[in-house]
Amino acid sequence: MTSADPLEEVTDLLQQLIRNRCVNDGTATSGHEVRSVETLSSYLAGPGAEMRTYESAPDRGNLVLRIEGSDPGAPTLCLMGHLDVVPASAEGWQRDPFGGELVDGEVWGRGAIDMLGITASMAVATKRLLREGWRPRGTLVYLAVADEEALGTYGAQWMTEQQWDAVKCDFLVTEFGGARVPIGQSPKLPIMVAEKGSHWMRLRVRGVPGHGSMPYRTDNAVVKMAEVVRRIASYRAPADLHDVWMRFIDGLDLPFAQRALLRSGPGLDLALGRMPLGVARMMHAATHTTFSPNVMHGGVKTNVVPDTAEIQVDIRTLPGVGPAAVHRMLRDAVGDLWRDVEIAEEGENLATSSPIDTPLWRALTAATERLVPGGTTLPFLVVGATDARFFRRKGVTSYGYGLFSERIPFNEFAAMFHGRNERIDQASLALMVELWSSTVREVLA
Ligand SMILES: [Zn+2]
């Protein structure tokens, strides 16, 4: 690469990362992120770049680049991107999912949005600072990790547990945010300051086995479980109008009546029913602990009345909702049948959140307002999971952000995650290079 045109560089780098096919199928031997670690380290190499590669398992590469600050008392900021992508089959795509083609100002391919476009733009911003010989007061860490798409075991979790000194920081920014909320007049860009937790549960009910030819008044575990599932599915957890939600609603320029509706529990339930389904699902998940019964097993043979049935429920918790509250809500949902339900297995992963009024918030907001005319930022929370949680648990103020042009509104942005025809426009890539450069300068100056 000879040119130092940031748009050309970020496009080229993203194309290479897509073509590296670091597909994570959830097995330990997939991913092969070393390929992209190699691409990035040869791009970033140069004077002032202190780089190290960490292999958490064979071929599972993580890259750390540090620009040490001059003042040990000044903060450390980490820009973190992941290198792996979820599988994609060419069926249903208009372009090769691993071709990295540039068509009409858009780069196509798996990972363009989630999140190689951000990972590449963070690298280009870092390279720009290196070329300038920039010497900050605080320390910059550029971190590219493996395995985000399968719980971070070989990536962010491993780095925070095994190599903390290499990635220790005060502030961190990673995915996912920065696409325009399709509500209100002027551009409103969400910075993700929190993410929900998960509390996955395997529940079992028992019955009495018997001959399938005589079902009269039998205790059939499958029939009982069907009713448990029905009750869980129709359960309405109470709305939790937490601080992030209130600040989000207040930041949208909504008419007074609509804002009042969204600021009350019953009003919110009413408003959800009138919203486009995609927006309603997101807003519901942002304000409720959710219960989705997603796996069901029961019975052994057509002519045997089953004596056990099991379900797996995907429960996603809001900040502040622990195991006791989850059990209470399930008990409410299942009612009198709860005495027949055994908890066979449960795994808890608490929600995490970061404060809103921080130097990183102010820097991201100032850069956004400068780069997007009439635009501003809003706090919101991730309803799934990202690598930010490992850092929040270490006390790091961590946000999910990016900066997408009007070509990628929020609904399309969300649909492209793990979906078909994933692509990003070059204007968004250029915006992000500027966003990261100016944020780093401001936080670490
Ligand atoms: Zn991602």
Image (cartoon, rainbow, N blue to C red):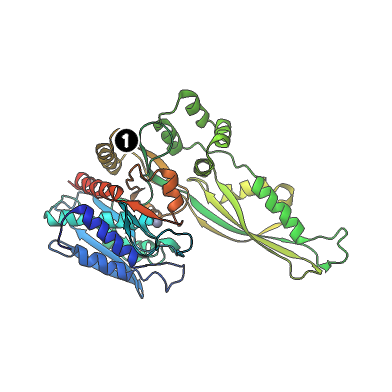
**Residue at far top of view:** 256
Q: Residue at x 73, y 64 (%)?
A: 308
Which residue, given by chain and number where applicable, does mark 1 sit on? 375
Whether residue 333 appears in this view of the structure is yes
Find residue 61 and report its horizontal and vertical position in percent.
32, 69
Neighbourhood count class around disc 1 (C-alpha, 10 Å): few under 14, some 14–19, many 20 upward:
some
Q: Nearer the viewer, residue 207 or 96?
A: 96
The residue sitting at 28% across, 42% down in the picture is 364
Q: Quadrant of residue 101?
A: bottom left
Residue 290 locus on image (x, y percent)? 56, 47
Apparent side of residue 146 relative to residue 273 in the rendered image (left or right): left
The residue at the far bottom in this view is 58
Q: Position of residue 341 (x, y in %)?
A: 70, 56
Where, quadrant-wise, is the N terminus in this rendering?
A: bottom left
Residue 352 at least partly seen: no
Q: Residue at x 20, y 44 (%)?
A: 442
Check disc 1 and give the amino acid type. Gly
Q: Is residue 327 above or below residue 15?
A: above
Q: In terms of image quarters, where does ligand 1 lie?
A: bottom left
Q: Position of residue 388 (x, y in %)?
A: 38, 53
Q: Residue at x 30, y 51 (%)?
A: 105
